[in-house]
Image: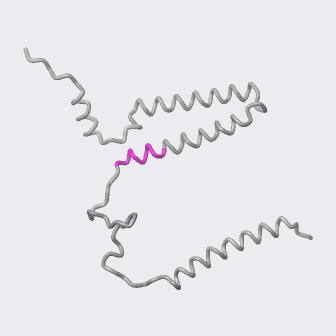
Amino acid sequence: MTTSPEFWSTAFFIVATFGICALMLGGSALLGGRAGGRAKNDPFESGVVSASPEHLRFSAKFYLVAVFFVIFDVEALFLYAWAISVREAGWAGFVEALIFIFILLASLVYLARIGALDWAPAAISRRKKRATEPAPVAH
């Protein structure tokens, strides 16, 4: 049984990838510093030590909006691929793309109606709502 050159090139690529990963991990373990310090585990970003020790907490709605963004962004990639092959897809592909866009818009309207796209905490939203409501008129 003979093996094809594609097999050997793929096998070499996989072995080389694992070898480079092992080399980098082993090198950092052997050459890395082991000295502990008082500020070693403190948050550090962009060359500035954090001013406050507590962590900034994000609302879970922030992450939900981020996930929605990723989902809609990936679906935009599907539409881009469709736009490239629009001539080959013909009218059937056009109708399918319209149905896809309609489902996307319907889901976006649904998410907006249930408030899933508002990542502000509910207390802030209520304060903003009260601030925009007209004051009751005293008789």
Q: Residue at x 42, y 48 (%)?
A: 63
Instruction: Using the image, determine if residue 51 lies above or below residue 38.
Output: above
Q: Nearer the viewer, residue 44 or 128?
A: 44
For the stretch drawn in magenta, the main secondary structure is helix
How many marks the image carries: the answer is 0
Direction front: furthest residue: 47
Residue 80's place in the image compared with 23, above or below, is above
In the rendered view, does 22 fall on the left or right side of 139? right
- At horizontal 59% and vertical 39% (from top left) the residue drawn is 75
Q: Quadrant of the C terminus?
A: top left
Q: Which segment did they paint magenta?
A: 59-67
Q: Position of residue 122 (x, y in %)?
A: 29, 39
Residue located at (63% from left, 27% from top):
99
| Image quadrant where one finds the N terminus | bottom right
Give the colour scheme of this rendering.
one colour
Q: Residue 49: image x %, image y %?
A: 32, 67
Q: Nearer the viewer, residue 113 or 134?
A: 134
**At 72% across and 37% down in the image, what residue appears?**
84
Q: Nearer the viewer, residue 44 or 104?
A: 44
Tell me where residue 110 appears, x and y as whole percent: 46, 30
Magenta stretch encompasses residue 61: yes
- Give the percent coordinates (x, y) of residue 7: 82, 66
Q: Is residue 63 above or below residue 116?
A: below
